[in-house]
Image (cartoon, grey):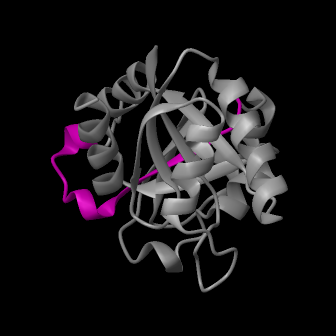
Amino acid sequence: MEVKIALLRGINVGGKRKLLMADLKKVCLLIGWTDVTTYIQSGNIVFNSDRSNDDCALSLKEIISSKFSLDVPVIVKSFSELENIINENPFTKLRIDISQLYLTFLKSIPNNEDVLLLSKMIKQDDQFIVRNSVVYIRCFGKYHRSKLTNDFFETKLKVEASTRNWKTILKLSELAQSI
């Protein structure tokens, strides 16, 4: 068994695509996950499974679709992957306020050409660095005013994405350590 983290995109945001965490936890147990813990209402799940990340993501996506009639993108990372992602954040070395930090998880590693084009496009204060299947973001203002959104990265990098603030990332790591 391996500790994993599932990240759902776009549930319980703005009163749309409502999904109670208690119901989400029940379907996770139905697909065979153990030690299931959810964190806040935006679709963060920490659990144990012996299945691959892709298999876990597909199983959860399918059961959410069949039980709740919702099409919800799901990204799954192992705890060790999450720890590496946390340790590799180039912005944490700057000793800045963590309220400026965000992380966009990508479903897969984007094409190098798309990453290069993206890097040339952005001319604003907010900063980002794409490494493998994550985008490290530093927002100088409010994230909801930034152009560095899920939709932006999905469109430009041609992969599904889900973003979390740094505080949530650290909490998920803490929860994963306790399983």
Q: Does 107 appear in magenta? A: yes
Q: To which quarter of the image does residue 132 belong?
A: top right
Tell me: residue 43, above or below residue 114. Answer: below
Is there any visible trace of residue 157 in the rendered image? no
Q: Nearer the viewer, residue 152 or 123?
A: 152
Bounds of the magenta segment: 92-108
Q: Residue at x 76, y 47 (%)?
A: 63
Indicate left or right for 31 with 34 as reference. right
Q: Nearer the viewer, residue 89 or 84?
A: 84
Q: Position of residue 106 (x, y in %)?
A: 64, 40
Indicate left or right for 149 with 44 as reference. right
- The quadrant of the picture occupied by the C terminus is top left
Q: Residue at x 61, y 53 (%)?
A: 8
Q: Residue at x 76, y 64 (%)?
A: 68
Q: Position of residue 103 (x, y in %)?
A: 46, 48
Q: Nearer the viewer, residue 63 or 173?
A: 63
